[in-house]
Structures are given as C-alpha cells and as structure tokens.
Amino acid sequence: MALARGILAAVSSVARQSEGKLGFAQRAFASTTSVNGIPVEVHNESGSKRVIVTKTLPGDRWLQYLINADCRVEVCKHPDIILSNATIKKLMGNKCDGVIGQLTEDWGSELFEALKQAGGKAYSNYAVGYNNVKVDEATKRGLPVGNTPGVLTETTAELAAALTFAAARRVVEADVFMRAGRYQGWLPDLFVGNLLQNKTVGIIGAGRIGAAYARMMVEGHKMNLVYYDPYPNKHLEEYIKLYGELLRHRGEPPVACKRVETVEEVLKEADVVSLHCNLDASTRHLMNASRLNMMKKNAVLVNAARGPCIDEAALVAHLKANPDFRCGLDVFEDEPAMKPGLADCPNAVIVPHIASASLWTRSGMATLAAANVAGILSGYPVWNKIDILPFVEKPMPAVPRAAPSIVNAKELKLKMVAE
Ligand SMILES: NC(=O)c1ccc[n+]([C@@H]2O[C@H](COP(=O)([O-])OP(=O)(O)OC[C@H]3O[C@@H](n4cnc5c(N)ncnc54)[C@H](O)[C@@H]3O)[C@@H](O)[C@H]2O)c1
C-alpha cells in the first residue's frame, strides 16, 4: 500500500531506468511524482519508511540496501545542481525517516531540526569528508551522521597522480595547442616539462589518500618521499623501507622516506608537493604566499584535498610570477567559483572536483551511504571498522547487519559491532 504522506502529488509517469550509464542499466521500475512541487523518482512505493536521496546516485546496490530495510526511496530530480535548504526541507516534508545528502548541502541546525521534526532517525553524507555537516547539531538532536570512508582512497590518489603528471608534463597546455591546429612539427623545446623519476615527492597529510599517492609515486617512479603529518605513518615508512631494500638488492639506487617536523621542510626539499590533509583551522590557507615562495621555482603543487587549504589568490599571483611553477587542482577555495585569473594561467591544470569519480568508488559511496541509513533504520549496531569492503563486495545475503560508518556513534552511545 502506498504511504499516505499527505505530501505527494499525482504520480506523473512510470519510467524504466535504462540510462545505460553509471551502472543504472539493471534498475527496476520506478515511478516519478512530485513532493511539494519538487520532482522525485520513487522506488519501492509501498516501503514503510521514507528515505529522501537528494541526488541521483550511481549503481543499484545502494537501492537494494534501502529496499531490504523496507524503505520507500525518493530520489530528488530538481534541476538545481546545489539544492537550497528550502528545497531540502520541502523534500523532507512532515514525514521523513532518513536522508542521503551531498557535500554541497548545508547540513546544520536548520536541516537537522527539520529532519527531526519530520520524525527522522538517520542522515548520511554521500562523501567521506563532512565539513558541510555540523555534526554537533545532529548529535544534539539524537541523529546519527554517516559518511563513506574506505572506497575513495585509491581513486582519489590516482587523480592526484594524474594531476601531478599533467602539470609536470604540461599535458593540458599541449592538448589546447593541438586542438588549436598550432602543431607544425616536432621541435626540441616544444612543451618541455619536468622528469619526476628519482626526484622527491612531498606529502602534507600522510593519511589514507596521502599514503596511497605516496606509494604510487615512490613505487612507480622511484621518487624519494618527504612528508609532514602531526602523526607518523609507520606503515608507510616501513613499506618504503622494504621497497628501498628490494631496489638495493636488485642493484638499483634505493628510495628513502623521511618524516619532517614542519611543512616548510617539505616545501623546500620536494619537487612535487601534494596536499592530503583534512580541512580544519590548522590547514586553512596552509599554502599561503610565503610558503609558496619557499617551494622550488619549477615545483608542482597538487591539491585534491579541500580548496581552502590553499590561499588561491596567492597561488594565482605565484603562478603568474613563476611561469615554470605548476599546479594541479581538483578543489577550489570558493567552489564552484575560481579566483580571478586562475583560468588564465596556462601553468595550472584545473578539474571540477572529480578526484573520487571512478564508477567503483561512486557506486561504493552510494552503497555505504545507503547502508548507513538502512542500518540505523533497521536498529543494527555500528560497524566503524576500517575494512568496509564486505558492505560493497559481498553478496547481499552475506552483508554485515550493521551501519558501516557513523561519525557520531560514540557521542550518541550507539551499540557497536563487537571486535
Ligand atoms: N577531492 C576529492 O574528491 C576528495 C576525495 C576524498 C577525500 N578528499 C579529502 O582528502 C583529505 C584526506 O582524506 P583521507 O581519507 O586521506 O583522510 P585521513 O584522515 O586518512 O588523512 C588525513 C591526514 O591529514 C593529517 N593532518 C591533519 N592535520 C594536519 C596538518 N595540520 N598538517 C598535515 N597533516 C595533517 C592527519 O593526521 C591525517 O593523517 C580529506 O580532507 C578529504 O576531505 C578529497
């Protein structure tokens, strides 16, 4: 029986999902309707719990989690890329059990209060980072907040590596040149860039993504590593030490790994610096004019962490003053805007926050976000273990009966899965 929500307008059509992209091909029938004037796609109409998903998500597995938890799932089809709080409140209406939201949305007191008033019991961000979420506002209202760790690491590290090479080897400049029909023949000095083999890669923040990126650069290109992180990454250090021994054993020069006490030491020594720290007060404008000036004149700076880690106006000035300095940016200080002048710098490679955009990762994120909401609505304990792959890869009947990652589980004293 369809739920008597009092907020649904007439069902306007029934559509078979056959986009054939982003893994949607197998999706079952869904209907479309509107909620307070906002178009939504409805799955499992007769589900007893109502879950709002603010954007279309890739894959199908995520939907299975929610359907198995007896949820009616309403996916917002509003044309705005970034939904306003007013739109999200309309979507939640006066009866909403859970929401999967996006990092572009402002999940603070206003939205959590509306979710609480609608009888909500769970929220999950569709992201590992949750700087768009005021977790204490959710905790205050007894609302668990989920995130999606463990499936972004390699994909994000690969994009950081792609930006590194694109910047060092001037790939985008050269592509623009070709498309403009300006290539008239091979020349010894055409788009000469930097060789990275055996040079030094610097990491600021050697957590999951920083360490994965470091291994790609060290193993793949025999680069030495210098890193700054308030906490040592012993696993990474040990890994590189063993790799260095393997190289030595084979008669090749070994690689080295060094943790230093300051950001400045990394900047002075490294040929490439990649940022992989979280965004907080200690890392906002971590890269400012004076620190940029400490880097080598022909160094490469990569940011696939968060935009405000770099003072972007200072970076534009630095790029203009130092044409051999290059950067690769996935994230921007005032996203989606860029600081004036950045788009005119040929020595900047700029992409629209696509670091986690592999199909495996984006579907995995959807699965974890849905499993968070479904797990809480089903009264399951919280997993909060590092290995979340069972949720993403095990056959559905064998998936853990748990909510994979709830960031305020301790504060809310939620039951945890026994170790
Ligand atoms: N561009 C994207 O699409 C994308 C995708 C995933 C993650 N991210 C961002 O990447 C960042 C890293 O993600 P992760 O999964 O590796 O997180 P993580 O928590 O595993 O690693 C972050 C590391 O930063 C370190 N750190 C904290 N403060 C620091 C400081 N002041 N200076 C240097 N290091 C500091 C921490 O000790 C930790 O080791 C997150 O902020 C996340 O928001 C971006």
Image: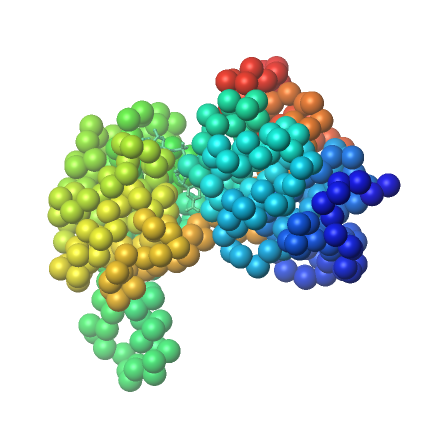
Residue at 63% in and 60% down: 21
Near-viewer residue (61 or 279): 279
- The image position of residue 379, as x and y in percent, is 69, 23
The picture places residue 166, in percent across and down from the top left corner, at: 33, 59
Is the residue 121 above or below the residue 319 in the image? Answer: above
Of 409 and 192, which appears nearest the observer?
409
Please indicate whether residue 288 sits to the left or right of residue 309 in the image.
Answer: left
Residue at the location (35% across, 71% down)?
175
In this picture, is 241 found above or below 171?
Answer: above
The reply, left or right, for residue 291 in relation to residue 35 is: left
Work out which quarter of the rendered image holds the C terminus and state it. top right
Nearest the camera: 91 or 242? 91
The residue at 57%/48% (across/down) is 87
**In this orientation, does residue 162 appear?**
no
Residue drawn at the location 17% of the way across and 61% of the way down? 320
Q: Quadrant of the N terminus?
A: top right
